[in-house]
Image: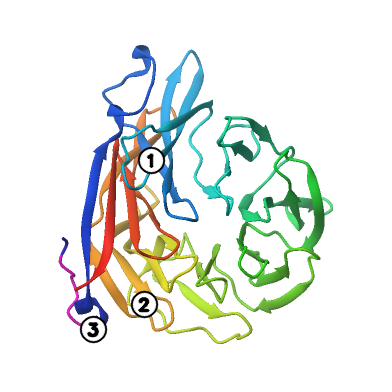
């Protein structure tokens, strides 16, 4: 168990974080001997299935013959080394994963030029790819995936003035589409109440739409770069990946007043509990190097907090990994491990540097 770090967080004294297992992924990942490297796989995303019985892991990457190869790994929560499933694809690893409610479909985005969002049929390994340019995808509503992307450029400018929101079925065929004014960079869905949230607009704002008719239900006046539903779609939480100080913010659906914020800075990476009241977020310190003109966010701790009150439940130290290389220098990004809360908030999974860990949040 990890001790909490702030005695001032009253709620933290009632909970503890217990490690349930830790596995080394090279022991279960299948790959050709020529691809085995001394450099560990980095993990870009982890995600629980809706029933919490499985975990999807997006990991990369290998470069061979001018191609980049990554893995999508599916494991069982109760026994992670038993009969894992694996899909390999030619691209950098996907930064986001979403499950359908029935656990039969998985959406991810291989990072490659002209490589669109992909839907995987888990039972037989069939895949289809959504055509066109997408900016984000936000999960399934009745087995239809919500996708957002750029629609129209401003005349004479390299700036988009509208976005499209589309739904695609399990064969990657478009079944619904609407155009939204402004450039939306983030989308999330709540299958519980059939709502879609769009955020990350240049002019600020969150738009809440009906997932069937695309009718606008509510609008907020300010948006950070990422939006996520929490607590059976009763609230939306937002976080700005580029913020220097601002913590995540949460709003109840139907109310424009922000709920109390937690005592942390930035909050990215962030994961919400789809059917619970907790949010997992990073507490980071911002710094700027004037000589190299680079910005840095150093994660100091990972916290779990109640979105309704901002009270921190537990906190624990972060782990770090080397991300993909960049430029011609061969240098690698230093990045925190990928992290996700389970839908009910019972579990937290984090992964990086060829390692995956599962924690359980328990009442003391």
Cα gap from disc 1 to disc 3, whole angstroms: 33 Å
Residue holding disc 2: 262
Which tag, 3 or 2, sits closer to the chain's start? Answer: 3
Q: Is residue 158 visible?
A: no
Q: Residue 12's x, y, as percent?
A: 23, 76
Cα gap from disc 1 to disc 2, whole angstroms: 27 Å
* Residue at horizontal 68 percent and vertical 33 percent from the top: 128
**Label number found at residue 10:** 3
Q: Is residue 318 part of the magenta span, yes or no?
A: no
* Residue at horizontal 51 percent and vertical 19 percent from the top: 67
Q: Is residue 50 visible?
A: yes
Residue range (magenta):
3-8
Dots 1, 3 in contact, CB < 8 A? no
Dots 1, 2 in contact, CB < 8 A? no
Against 328, is 261 above or below? Answer: below
Q: Which of 32 and 5 is in front in this view?
A: 32
* Residue at horizontal 38 percent and vertical 65 percent from the top: 345
Q: Which of 211 and 221 is in front in this view?
A: 211
Q: Is residue 254 left or right of residue 213?
A: left
Q: Is mark 2 on a helix, strand or loop?
A: loop
Residue holding disc 1: 43
Mark 3 crowdedness (10 Å alpha carbons): few <14, some 14-19, many ≥20: few
């Amino acid at each position: 168990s990890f001790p909490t770090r702030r005695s001032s967080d009253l709620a933290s004294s009632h909970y503890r974080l217990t490690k349930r297992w830790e596995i080394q992924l090279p022991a279960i990942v299948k790959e050709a001997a020529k691809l085995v490297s001394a450099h560990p796989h980095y993990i870009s995303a982890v995600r629980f299935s809706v029933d919490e019985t499985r975990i999807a892991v997006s990991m990369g990457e290998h470069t061979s013959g001018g191609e980049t190869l990554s893995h999508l790994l599916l494991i069982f929560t109760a026994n992670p080394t038993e009969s894992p499933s694996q899909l390999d694809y030619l691209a950098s690893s996907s930064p986001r994963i979403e499950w359908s409610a029935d656990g039969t479909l998985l959406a991810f985005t291989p990072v490659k030029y002209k490589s669109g969002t992909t839907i995987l049929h888990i039972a037989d390994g069939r895949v289809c790819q959504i055509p066109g340019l997408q900016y984000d995808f936000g999960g399934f509503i009745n087995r239809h995936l919500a996708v957002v992307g750029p629609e129209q450029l401003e005349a004479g400018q390299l700036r988009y003035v509208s976005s499209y929101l589309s739904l695609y079925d399990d064969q990657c065929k478009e079944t619904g589409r609407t155009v939204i004014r402004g450039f939306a960079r983030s989308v999330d869905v709540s299958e519980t109440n059939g709502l879609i949230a769009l955020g990350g607009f240049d002019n600020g704002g969150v738009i809440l739409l009906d997932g069937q008719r695309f009718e606008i239900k509510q609008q907020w006046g300010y948006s950070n770069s990422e939006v996520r539903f929490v607590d059976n779609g009763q609230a939306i939480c937002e976080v700005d990946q580029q913020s220097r100080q601002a913590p995540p913010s949460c709003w109840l659906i139907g109310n424009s007043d922000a709920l109390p914020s937690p005592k942390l800075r930035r909050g990215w990476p962030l994961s919400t509990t789809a059917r619970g009241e907790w949010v997992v977020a990073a507490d980071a310190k911002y710094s700027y190097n004037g000589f190299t003109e680079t910005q840095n966010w150093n994660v100091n701790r990972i916290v779990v907090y109640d979105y309704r009150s901002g009270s921190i439940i537990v906190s624990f130290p972060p782990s770090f990994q080397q991300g993909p290389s960049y430029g011609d220098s061969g240098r690698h990004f230093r990045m925190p491990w990928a992290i996700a809360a389970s839908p009910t908030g019972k579990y937290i999974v984090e992964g990086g540097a060829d390692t995956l860990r599962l924690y359980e949040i328990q009442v003391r």
